[in-house]
Image: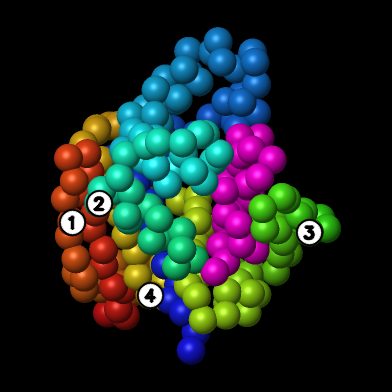
Amino acid sequence: MAGKVFFSVTMSLDGFMAPEAVPVEEVFSPDGQNDPRVQRWLTKWSELQAWVFPLRFFRENLKLGEGGEEGLDNDIARATHERTGASVMGKRMFDAGELAWPEEAPFHTPVFVVTHTKRDPWKRPGGTTFNFVNDDIEAALDQAREAAGDRDVRIAGGGATILEYVNAGLIDEFSIALSPVLFGSGIRLFEGVDADRVALEPVRAEHSPRVTHLTYAVRER
C-alpha cells in the first residue's frame, strides 16, 4: 500500500515559513556573513527554528555529538524522519542545502529535485542520493513514490514547491510547528493557496514548551 504525501514545516505565528529571500550564495559566503541583511536573515531563521537545535535526534542526524533533549519535540522530529521513504524539493532549497548540508546529508533516503537543470544523480554518504527531475511536479512525485515503497513521501520545500503540490491536490496531510516568533514579512507558507479547492480536517494538536504542533488532513473542497 502506498504511503501518504505530506509536508512538515516550522511557521512563525504570523504565517511565515522563512524570512525575506536573500541569495543563498550570500548567506553561506564569508563576505555575506558581514552583510547586515544576511545577519538579520540568520537571526530570524535561528529564532524560528530554535526548537529543533537542542533535540537529541537533530544532533544525532547531523553528527553533532552525543546528548540533546528528549520529549515531545524530539519524538515528533524522529517520527517525521522515520516515516519518510523519499523526499521532493525545489531547486532553491537544494541550492541552499548543497552549500549548508554536511557531506552526509541529513535525509538518508532518495531525494528528487524539481529543476530545469540537467545533472546526474548525486550520491552522498549515508544513503542520500539526489535525483534531478526535469519534468513537472507530478513526475517527481511518481518517482519519489516508487522509491518510497510503502513509506511516506515528504515534500521538503521550499514554500513555492509546497504550494504547487497543495494547489495540485497532491498533499494528503501536513504538520506545522507553530513557533512563537513574529516576522512581519517574509515568505508566507500559504501565499497564493487555492482556497476554493483545499479544505482541511484537524488531526491533532500537541503542545511543547517551545512550539505547538498542528497536523491536518487535506481534503478537496
- Type of amino acid under label 2: Leu
- Type of amino acid under label 1: Glu
* Towards the viewer: 134 or 177: 177
Residue where numbered disc 4 is placed: 172
Q: Is residue 99 above or below residue 3?
A: above
The span from disc 1 to disc 2 (Cα, nearest Å) is 8 Å
* Residue 113 drawn at (x, y percent): 65, 58
Residue where numbered disc 1 is placed: 206
Element marked by disc 4:
loop
Dot 1, how many residues are within 10 Å of its Cα: few (below 14), some (14-19), or many (20+)?
Answer: few
Q: Tell whether label 2 touches label 1 (CB within 8 Å).
A: yes
For the record, the magenta segment spans 85-113
Give the mark, 3 or 1, whose residue is nearer the N terminus: 3
Give the mark, 4 or 3, whose residue is nearer the N terminus: 3
Element marked by disc 1:
strand
Give the mark, 4 or 1, whose residue is nearer the N terminus: 4
